[in-house]
């Protein structure tokens, strides 16, 4: 009778436990083909290796997605960066001023935006607005959301397809901390300013309105200035150059104005950060509010 050895090979394996085991005699041991016997452990090792590699890739993607906010937190410091994350900015209009101002705000660290516009992207918009050829025909608010998420994937942006008017102004902007007026039409600009002050009679928010007037044409960009009308109201532009045949809307001056609007918002928040230091960032927007 052949001597029985205490050496053995596993005949099967599962995750974390041995499924089967067989003892071999000394004579048998030399005749055993280890390939099918070891297939179970090798398959398990390969599966674990694949899972580990997949996990590393996912971790790398998460790290990449968060790297933008990590850098901004390092730039501002954790405390003020948390404040920026609590501020809700409403933008009335997603054209040349609104789309570019939104991009500057996102790059600065703001992440809670509500953008309201009824229009669609057209080829005529591409010379100055933050859109691209393949987005022609899209609703502007959805195209803008798509573009802004490429800057910060963690952005909280509410795109609203609507024309702003007296009947919906309160519902759209009453819970915003800051309002940016970004319309093209002078009459609509004036109407929104009146609605802002009417709302301020009822409640303290929005705390600030940043509007624009006179940003068309080219040259004399230093004439685009920021004027404090009231503590809660600033006006950006030269206040005289309206859009017309001799003064078309062009990217340089439009972007100067949009950048100054964003800078006013940032400066106001930094100077009044106590308003948000203990604020609850999860205030809900009710559709029927």
Image: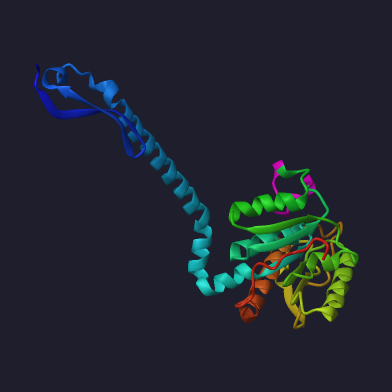
Q: Main secondary structure of the magenta part?
A: loop
Task: Give whichever of 215, 36 is nearer the camera.
Answer: 36
Residue 145 in the image: state x and y as whole percent: 69, 53
Colour mapping used in the image: rainbow
Residue 227 in the image: state x and y as whole percent: 75, 78
Residue 82 in the image: state x and y as whole percent: 57, 70
Tell me what residue is drawn at x 74 percent, y 66 percent. Answer: 90
Tell me what residue is drawn at x 12 percent, y 17 percent. Answer: 27
Q: Quadrant of residue 45?
A: top left
Task: Give whichever of 31, 169 is nearer the camera.
Answer: 31
As displayed, is residue 30 above or below residue 79? above
Q: Quadrant of residue 262?
A: bottom right
> Taking the image as drawn, is residue 101 in sight?
no
Magenta stretch holds residue 168: no
Residues shaded magenta: 122-134
Q: Is residue 178 left or right of residue 199?
A: left
The C terminus sits in image quarter: bottom right
> Taking the image as drawn, is residue 230 in sight?
yes
Task: Give whichever of 233, 201 is nearer the camera.
Answer: 201
Magenta stretch holds residue 133: yes
Q: Quadrant of residue 191?
A: bottom right
């Amino acid at each position: 009778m052949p001597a029985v050895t205490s050496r053995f090979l596993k005949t099967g394996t599962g995750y974390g436990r041995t499924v089967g085991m067989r003892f071999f005699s000394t004579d048998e041991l030399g005749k055993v083909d280890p390939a099918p016997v070891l297939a179970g452990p090798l398959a398990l090792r390969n599966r674990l290796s694949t899972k580990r590699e997949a996990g590393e890739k996912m971790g790398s993607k998460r790290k990449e997605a968060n790297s933008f906010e990590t850098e901004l937190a390092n730039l501002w410091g954790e405390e003020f960066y948390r404040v920026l994350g609590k501020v809700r900015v409403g933008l009335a209009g997603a054209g040349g001023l609104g789309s570019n101002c939104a991009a500057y705000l996102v790059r600065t660290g703001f992440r809670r935006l509500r953008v309201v516009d009824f229009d669609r992207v057209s080829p005529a918009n591409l010379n100055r607005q933050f859109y691209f050829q393949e987005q022609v025909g899209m609703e502007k608010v959805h195209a803008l959301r798509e573009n802004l998420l490429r800057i910060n994937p963690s952005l909280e942006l509410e795109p609203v397809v609507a024309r702003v008017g007296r009947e919906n102004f309160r519902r759209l902007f009453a819970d915003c901390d800051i309002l940016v007026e970004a319309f093209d039409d002078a009459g609509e600009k004036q109407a929104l300013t009146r609605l802002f002050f009417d709302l301020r009679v009822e409640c303290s928010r929005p705390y600030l309105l940043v509007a624009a007037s006179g940003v068309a044409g080219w040259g004399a960009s230093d004439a685009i200035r920021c004027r404090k009308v009231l503590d809660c109201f600033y006006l950006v532009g030269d206040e005289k150059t309206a859009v017309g045949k001799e003064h078309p809307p062009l990217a340089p001056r439009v972007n100067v104005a949009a950048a100054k609007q964003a800078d006013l918002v940032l400066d106001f928040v930094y100077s009044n950060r106590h308003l948000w230091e203990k604020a609850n960032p999860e205030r809900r927007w009710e559709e029927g509010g």
